[in-house]
Image (cartoon, grey):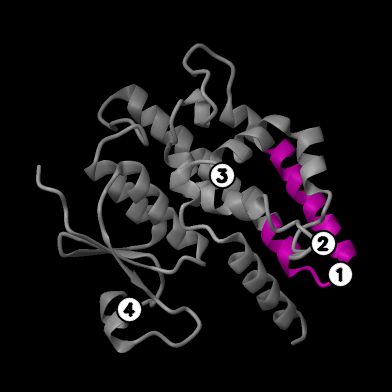
């Protein structure tokens, strides 16, 4: 099979676009990168590529595919690997359902609280949102979803005991990078006691997140200082209006 021609329209500051980078790196696929400036109106040529003007978008052998989760799924389906099992067996279909449920729970129940903390106008609001974030991890049993008891799971550090990254880590890795950095005082977007709360109350989740962000495919485009500084500036500016 000939290598596909892939053009990735992206921005390294965007956690959603970052998902595509993780998938491409993990699959070992070559691609051309086109950086889209998100600080100014989109150029007319890019609106022809993606009328929504969002990133990421890929051109895969000339076919345009937008939206990060769809891009990641296309890549995983087109290039079978450790990321997801085939869907044409009952066990594969069930594993894909487990992946989808975990990712949905992470974003709808947990990351929404992290987002609220970043928008907080006071330290009290930030502390409350950070507490709600950790509570959401507990209440929605993310540790149990990550590492369920049973013989069908492995002993590796990733989703359901996988030895290598799965699609769960592809879709959450860029957000875990932010979760484990934006609490630092130079950014101040999550309460500074977040690591202690995670270690004390959801240690398996915390250990998983720490392992994910160490992987090269997750962090190779990551610039913490740039992302943290710009994110903090954005929310501080928003708070003044």
Check the picture and name the quadrant holding the N terminus: top left
Q: Nearer the viewer, mark 3 or mark 2?
A: 3
Q: Nearer the viewer, mark 4 or mark 3?
A: 3
Residue at the spot 66% in from the left edge and 49% down from the top edge: 110
Q: Nearer the viewer, mark 2 or mark 4?
A: 2
Q: Which residue is mark 3?
A: 213
User: How much space separates mark 1 and mark 3, taking CA atoms?
Assistant: 29 Å
Q: Which residue is mark 1?
A: 122
Residue at the spot 41% in from the left edge and 29% down from the top edge: 95
User: How much space separates mark 3 and mark 2, taking CA atoms?
Assistant: 24 Å
User: How much space separates mark 1 and mark 2, taking CA atoms?
Assistant: 6 Å
Q: Which residues are magenta?
A: 114-141
**Residue 119 figure quarter:** bottom right
Q: Which residue is mark 2?
A: 126
Q: Secondary structure at mark 4?
A: loop
Q: Mark yes or no: residue 141 visible.
A: no
Instruction: Classify 32 as above or below 195.
Output: below
Q: Tell me the number on the disc at residue 51.
A: 4
């Amino acid at each position: 099979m000939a290598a596909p021609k892939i053009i990735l329209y992206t921005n390294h500051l965007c956690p959603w676009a970052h998902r595509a980078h993780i998938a491409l790196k993990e699959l070992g696929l070559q691609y051309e990168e086109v950086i889209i400036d998100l600080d100014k109106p989109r150029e007319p040529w890019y609106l022809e590529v993606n009328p929504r003007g969002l990133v990421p978008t890929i051109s895969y052998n000339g076919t345009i595919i937008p939206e990060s989760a769809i891009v990641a799924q296309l890549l995983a389906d087109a290039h079978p690997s450790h990321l997801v099992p085939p869907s044409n067996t009952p066990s594969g279909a069930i594993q894909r359902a487990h992946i989808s449920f975990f990712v949905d729970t992470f974003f709808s129940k947990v990351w929404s609280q992290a987002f609220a903390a970043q928008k907080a106008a006071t330290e009290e609001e930030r502390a409350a949102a950070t507490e709600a974030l950790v509570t959401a991890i507990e209440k929605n049993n993310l540790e149990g979803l990550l590492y369920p008891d049973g013989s069908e799971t492995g002993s590796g550090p990733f989703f359901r005991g996988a030895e290598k990254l799965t699609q769960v880590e592809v879709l959450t890795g860029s957000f875990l990078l932010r979760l484990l950095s934006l609490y630092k005082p130079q950014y101040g977007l999550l309460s500074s006691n977040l690591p202690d709360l995670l270690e004390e109350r959801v240690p398996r989740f915390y250990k998983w997140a720490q392992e994910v962000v160490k992987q090269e495919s997750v962090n190779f485009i990551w610039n913490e200082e740039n992302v943290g500084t710009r994110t903090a500036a954005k929310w501080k500016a928003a708070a003044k209006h």
